[in-house]
Image (spheres, rainbow, N blue to C red):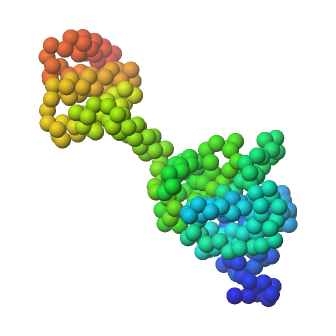
Amino acid sequence: MKCPYHPKEEVTGYCFVCGEFGCEQCLTSHEGQLYCQTHYAPIAEKEGKSASARKRQLRQRLVVRYKDGRIDYGVCFALNPHQNHFYLERMTREGEPTGDTVPVRFADLKAVFYVKSFDGDFDRHARYEEWRAEGNEVVVEFQDGECIHGHTLHPYDEEEPRFHLIPHNPKTNNLSVLVEKSALKRVYSREEYKRKREEDKAREKLEAGDSSLTQEETVGDFYFETRSYEAALQQYQNAERKAGQSHRLRKKMLAAEYNIGVQYIKRREYARALKWMERVLEQEPKNQHAKKKILQLRKILDKMSASG
């Protein structure tokens, strides 16, 4: 399809606002979207830059990584993530043009890295274009095992086939990463990834430790050591359902319940703390620590009730 304004040029995309088709000369890329000259003008004016200066700036260094392990280096005038491919003007790792331009299919990619330098040896005193993240904090895990922590450029959309990720650490060589979802194993929230890491460590400990413990009990022990007592209790309960009751598990569950109560005391949630301590004493009537805490908590609650 030929460009309506430059008949010798092929159409490379369309304006995000009006949908008008155009070639590389007609369209300008801004934060992952293409704009015609009419609709890019107010953006350029707002940023205090002319369209021509913006285009010069957009010759961003790209490191293109494929699913099969291949790597390409180059630049691109109009990389539209909503199309099926883009054209890369190849360069060497040293930054010298090779003279050839190749089509790159998104379906073949792992990700496109917008970088400060091809070889990673960038000038740490230079100022680089900043990408302002407005989306979600996530950790992406690629099928090859690599994980990257960052914020999505825009709110994360499950339906989009690819998205821009701004790395969490601004001091790295990567300015942004256009992530191809088909190359991912999973996208985690920060909390989900933290939980995964904890469970992986617990599983490694299980494999290296006492084989008589179930995986659930070992994960519970790990949570207990990290003072995540409610998570530990849940795992101990899972272990009990799986392997049956045992004196060892019962002691661990009581210790977790007692420490949950202590954590509520520290948060000054005395009524909830009292319920946990009473739960411990009900199961272990001779537990002197629980008895002492219950007396203290009842005095505090009586005083609060009287003054309230």
| Above or below: residue 9 compared with residue 246 | below
Q: Please identify the quadrant where the N terminus is shown.
A: bottom right
The residue depicted at 77 percent of the width and 63 percent of the height is: 91
How many numbered marks have been drawn onto this rendered protein structure?
A: 0
The spot of residue 292 in percent (x, y) is: 24, 11
The residue depicted at 21 percent of the width and 23 percent of the height is: 251
Question: Foreground residue, 43 or 148?
Answer: 148
| Above or below: residue 113 compared with residue 300 | below
Residue 276: image quadrant is top left
Q: Is residue 136 left or right of residue 174?
A: left
The residue depicted at 80 percent of the width and 56 percent of the height is: 94
| Above or below: residue 208 compared with residue 268 | below
The spot of residue 264 in percent (x, y) is: 34, 24
The residue depicted at 71 percent of the width and 73 percent of the height is: 102
The spot of residue 178 in percent (x, y) is: 62, 60
- State whether residue 299 appears in this view: no
Q: Please identify the quadrant where the C terminus is shown.
A: top left
Q: Is residue 218 left or right of residue 129?
A: left
| Above or below: residue 8 compared with residue 284 | below
- State whether residue 198 appears in this view: yes
Q: Is residue 162 left or right of residue 74?
A: left
The spot of residue 45 in percent (x, y) is: 82, 62
Question: Foreground residue, 144 or 59?
Answer: 144
